[in-house]
Structure formats: structure tokens, C-alpha cells
Image: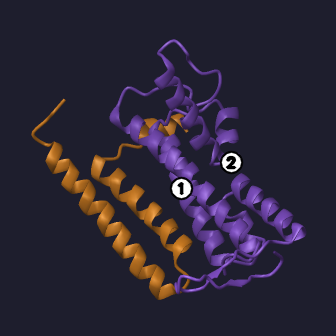
Chain colours: A orange, B purple
């Protein structure tokens, strides 16, 4: 795993996309019953994760640490 | 109150329905399936023949956890550092509770000696959050398995 840690280099955007994907999928299957409802909820949650993440990123852009 | 009972208030508002009590045997089964779902993500659903949910929960929780470890996650565990004050101690304890949510994944990672140190890069912080969220999501799926077992959810 430590070897993988040294090999695995994700950008911030890739990490956010992976996180949004898996989290939205779990939420969709937890809260909805039918396949169509799950698909709609997954797309909605995933889009919001990405949009809010990008929005917050741009808001913080003028304030580098 | 054994059965669901419709209450008739005097105020003219819609009648409220009292919650149904769960038989002890069903309650115990729910706890067992919830605990199994906590220990191994998706197992509580698999044993209730909810195959699609079991597969999705297993893949998502394990993927998030393994990705977190691969990114260099710091896993919180006792003994906790008390030298930095109460707030930091509280954060570490809560982090431990969140990490513990991944069940066997956390135990296995600790036994393999993973997640012992902070990595001095942003991806390590992301890894810590990935693993924490895997734990929180797994706790939600374990509660879902309990709800299905006691008949609160289909």
C-alpha cells in the first residue's frame, strides 16, 4: 500500500471526481428504490458535488495560503 | 401499544399514527445484520438478498477506503495525544469513530501498520478524508440494513 501511495498521484480534480462518484452512488442507493429514481438522484448529487466543489475552489482562488 | 393506532386529536388536524413496536426477535435480527453490515460493507444487505445494494455498498466503501489508504491516509486510533488541548483531542476521538465505521477495513489496515503517520502532502489529507467518509457511509449502510431487517424500509 505504501508503494501504491508513492505511485498514486491524483490531481485535486481527479480526487474530487472520485469522491463525488462513490459518495453519490451510495446516497442514491440508500435513499431511492427504483433504478430510474436512483439514476436521477445520482446525477443530481454528483453534479452538485462537482459544481459546489468547483465554485468553492474559485472562491478560494484569490486567497492562496 | 402493540399495533399501529390512529389517534384522533380534537384540534381537527390530520390523525397521527403511533409508531409500530418491533418484535424482540426481529429487533435482534436487525442488530445482527446491522453489525455484520458494519464489519463487512454490504454483508447486511447480501444476507437479506438485496444484491444490488450489497454490491454497490461494498464496491463504493471499499474503493473509498483503499483509495484513501493509497493516498496516504492518517488513521486515528488510541492512544490519543492530549498535549494539544481538548479540541484536538475531541477531533482525534471523532476521527477514530469515523475510521472505525469501515469495520474490518480499519482493523486490517491497523494490523498491517498502515495510516500511522501524517504525509506531508495535500493528497495525504485527501486520503484521510476519503477513509473517514468511507467509514461514515458504511455506518449509514449498516443502519439501512437494520431498517430493512426490522421492516421499516423495503
Residue B43 at x, y percent in the picture = 73, 64
Q: Nearer the viewer, residue B73 or B153?
A: B153
Residue B37, by quadrant, is: bottom right
Residue that numbered label 2 is attached to: B103
Residue drawn where x is 41% and y is 35% of the image = B124
Position of residue B62 in the picture relative to residue B85 (left or right): right
Check the image and report above or below for A34 versus A29.
below
Check the image and report above or below for B93 versus A13.
above
Position of residue B31 in the picture relative to residue B8 (left or right): right
Q: Residues within 10 Å of mark 1 (few under 14, many from 20)?
A: some
Residue B141 at x, y percent in the picture = 62, 62
Residue B21 at x, y percent in the picture = 79, 72
Could you tell me which secondary element the residue under label 2 belongs to?
A: loop
Residue B129, by quadrant, is: top left
Q: Nearer the viewer, residue A64 or B92?
A: B92
Name of the residue lying farthest toward the right: B25
Residue drawn where x is 41% and y is 73% of the image = A42
Residue A15, numbered circle: none
Chain on which label 1 sits = B
Q: Quadrant of the C terminus of chain B?
A: bottom right
Q: Earlier in the sequence, mark 1 or mark 2?
A: 1
Point out the frontmost of discs 1 and 2: 2
Chain on which label 2 sits = B
The residues bearing labels 1 and 2 have C-alpha atoms spaced at a distance of 14 Å
Q: Quadrant of the N terminus of chain B?
A: bottom right
Q: Nearer the viewer, residue A37 or B116?
A: A37
Could you tell me which secondary element the residue under label 1 belongs to?
A: helix
Name of the residue lying farthest toward the left: A62
Residue that numbered label 1 is attached to: B63
Residue drawn where x is 54% and y is 36% of the image = B95
Position of residue B86 in the picture relative to residue A12 (left or right): right
Labels 1 and 2 within one chain = yes
Amino acid at each position: 500500500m505504501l508503494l501504491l501511495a508513492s505511485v498514486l498521484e491524483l490531481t485535486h480534480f481527479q480526487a474530487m471526481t472520485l469522491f463525488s462518484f462513490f459518495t453519490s452512488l451510495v446516497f442514491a442507493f440508500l435513499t431511492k428504490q427504483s433504478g430510474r429514481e436512483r439514476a436521477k438522484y445520482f446525477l443530481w448529487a454528483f453534479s452538485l458535488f462537482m459544481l459546489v466543489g468547483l465554485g468553492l475552489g474559485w472562491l478560494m482562488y484569490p486567497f492562496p495560503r | 401499544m402493540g399495533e399501529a393506532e390512529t389517534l384522533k386529536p380534537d384540534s381537527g388536524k390530520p390523525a397521527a399514527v403511533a409508531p409500530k413496536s418491533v418484535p424482540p426477535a426481529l429487533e435482534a435480527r436487525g442488530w445482527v445484520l446491522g453489525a455484520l453490515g458494519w464489519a463487512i460493507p454490504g454483508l447486511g444487505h447480501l444476507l437479506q438478498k438485496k444484491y444490488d445494494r450489497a454490491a454497490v455498498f461494498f464496491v463504493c466503501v471499499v474503493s473509498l477506503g483503499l483509495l484513501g489508504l493509497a493516498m496516504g491516509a492518517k488513521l486515528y486510533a488510541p492512544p490519543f495525544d492530549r498535549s494539544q488541548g481538548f479540541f484536538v483531542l475531541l477531533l482525534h476521538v471523532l476521527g477514530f469513530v469515523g475510521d472505525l465505521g469501515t469495520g474490518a477495513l480499519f482493523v486490517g489496515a491497523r494490523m498491517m501498520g498502515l495510516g500511522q503517520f501524517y504525509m506531508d502532502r495535500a493528497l495525504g489529507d485527501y486520503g484521510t478524508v476519503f477513509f473517514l467518509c468511507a467509514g461514515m457511509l458504511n455506518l449509514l449502510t449498516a443502519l439501512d440494513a437494520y431498517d430493512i431487517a426490522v421492516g421499516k424500509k423495503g
